[in-house]
Amino acid sequence: MSEDDDPDNSRNRLLMMLAFTAVYVIWGSTYLAIRVGVRAWPPFLMSGVRFVTAGSLLYALLRARGVRAPARAEWGHAAIAGLLMLAGGNGLVTFAEQQVPSNLTALLVAGVPLHMALLDWARPGGKPPRRRVVVGIGVGAAGMALLVSGGRATSHEVSALAIAAILLSGVVWAAGSLYARYGALNAHPVMAAAQEMLVGGAALLLISAARGEPGVVARTGVTTESTLALVYLTIFGSLVAFSAFGWLVKATTPARLSTVAYVNPVVAVVLGWAILDERLGARAIAGAVLIVCAVLVMTLPKRA
């Protein structure tokens, strides 16, 4: 029997394809869902409910299937990754999307590989980036500058503070991703994702309570449209896509996983244009093209 006929290999290829599809398409659509959700839900409350619910369901499912309970040290490592990626990275994005269109948000977040390359170099024991990575960082930085300066030419009002929050979110997400790659997380990657969602979601709920967001919901209520967006984010954006991402961190190469950075924005831009009538000015489009090209230069194999 050839390697291609091996049932285990065929199953792994199918799982890999499904996981990448989930991360590409679902995560690309979450920018739209967040934009719709924050029309009625306060940002940190929505994110906290989303991740605590998804993390609890996933944790219970894994324990029911016999996955061991995480050790105390593993909770500590998961807490750092969850606080950086979810409370910091996703929380800031959700906060910013109250004033920034989903397409512009996704394009700004596409610069995460640039942040990761720089932070990986700066960490203890980090190696200087290769020449083409340096070129990619330079091109990507130029693209970010064009995108930010051209962001006010979009079809919606854009806040400078919200733009800054998105840029900061990319840095903390990159730091959390690097910590998850090198840190001693749970050996079961999906259990590690559940832990990160529980800790990150709990932190977001604490921030929400400090801001008085539950009282806002009690006074004003929420719409059916925004609640459906929250349900979509919880089930598909967190339970399915974040779990798939956690599995891919262990199952595939960093280069393949980094392709998410230039597929997600395409999905987000198309959905934002088709459903929310979001548009970008010429300068912002030029910046977006530079960022995508920079990520391609940094992540594609040298022969390609």
Image (spheres, grey):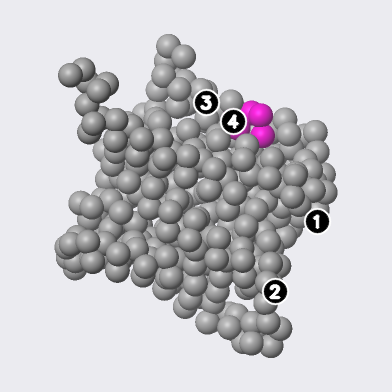
Local secondary structure at mark 3:
helix
Marks 2 and 4, Cα distance to the nearest angstrom? 35 Å
Q: Which numbered disc covers residue 157?
A: 1
Q: Which residue is mark 2?
A: 223
- Amino acid type at circle 4 is Val
Note whether 115 is above or below 202 in the view shown: above
Q: Which residue is mark 4?
A: 292
- Amino acid type at circle 1 is Glu
Marks 2 and 1, Cα distance to the nearest angstrom? 22 Å
Marks 3 and 4, Cα distance to the nearest angstrom? 6 Å
Local secondary structure at mark 1:
loop
In the rendered structure, which disc, 1 or 3, sits on the residue that comes first in sequence?
A: 1
Q: Nearer the viewer, residue 79 or 60?
A: 60
Residue located at (49% from left, 67% from top): 50
- Is residue 263 in view? yes
Say if mark 3 contacts mark 4, CB within 8 Å.
Answer: yes
Residue located at (34% from left, 63% from top): 58
Image location of residue 131, percent across then percent down: 44, 20
Q: Residues within 10 Å of mark 4 (few under 14, many from 20)?
A: many
On the image, which quarter does residue 257 sit in? Answer: top left
In the rendered structure, which disc, 4 or 1, sits on the residue that comes first in sequence?
A: 1
In the rendered structure, which disc, 2 or 4, sits on the residue that comes first in sequence?
A: 2
